[in-house]
Amino acid sequence: MEKIALIELNDSYLPQIADLYREAFAGEPWNDDWSDTKQLYEYIRDVSTAYNALNYGLLIDGKLAGISLGKISHWWEGTNYNIEELCISPTYQGQGIGSRFLALIEQGVREKGLVGIFLQTDNDKPSYHFYHKNGFQDLDMHVSLYKSVRNKNGSRDISKENSDKS
């Protein structure tokens, strides 16, 4: 029987986090290209070192098999754990390990006195159904918005930036 443990991750796990993240999101349905290791490390640092960071790892037989990167966030309704990234090694996907990981995370945040877990995902990916299966619900009034600020050729307009400095 496998030994499963929830741990809080720190900076010493950065290489293992990056490797697991790259592996988990390289294939279908995401097909993310994290071949630029420097960019990957910077991204992992962005999401794992925020103010009030709270990062969990799932160890299976001493090996990092899952990660949850996020932060504690205070809101008028209470204090939540906001998950920025969550993934399980493809080796363990489809075996109920992700659900066990979420249950351990829920127990951990409850022990910290937090009242909820917030996350965002794409509704056209398997993760959407996974989260629903694990008790997460859509927020009817919550909408994510995005605006690209790239030029049509894909670069920033630095001529405008430079003229604004004059």
Image (cartoon, grey):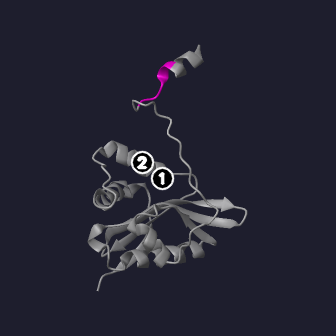
Q: Quadrant of the N terminus?
A: bottom left
Element assignment for label 2: helix
Type of secondary structure dominating the magenta stretch: loop
Q: Does residue 101 show up?
A: yes
x, y (%) of residue 143? 59, 57
Task: Answer whether residue 157 is magenta in the image.
Answer: yes
Quadrant location of residue 76? Answer: bottom right
Task: Answer whether residue 111 is magenta in the image.
Answer: no
Q: Does residue 104 show up?
A: no
Residue type, label 2: Tyr
Give me the residue at 59% from left, 75% from top.
110
Real-space CA distance between mark 1 and mark 2, rounded to the nearest whole angstrom: 6 Å
Q: Which residue is mark 2?
A: 43
Q: Is residue 155 above or below residue 110?
A: above
Q: Where are the magenta residues, as a range?
A: 155-159
Find residue 47 and name its label: 1
Outermost residue toward the bottom in this view: 1
Give me the residue at 56% from left, 54% from top.
144
Is label 1 in contact with label 2 (beta carbons under 8 Å)? yes
Give me the residue at 49% from left, 73% from top.
105
x, y (%) of residue 155? 42, 30
Give me the residue at 64% from left, 62% from top.
141
x, y (%) of residue 100? 42, 79
Nearer to us in this view, 4 or 74: 74
Q: Quadrant of the C terminus?
A: top right
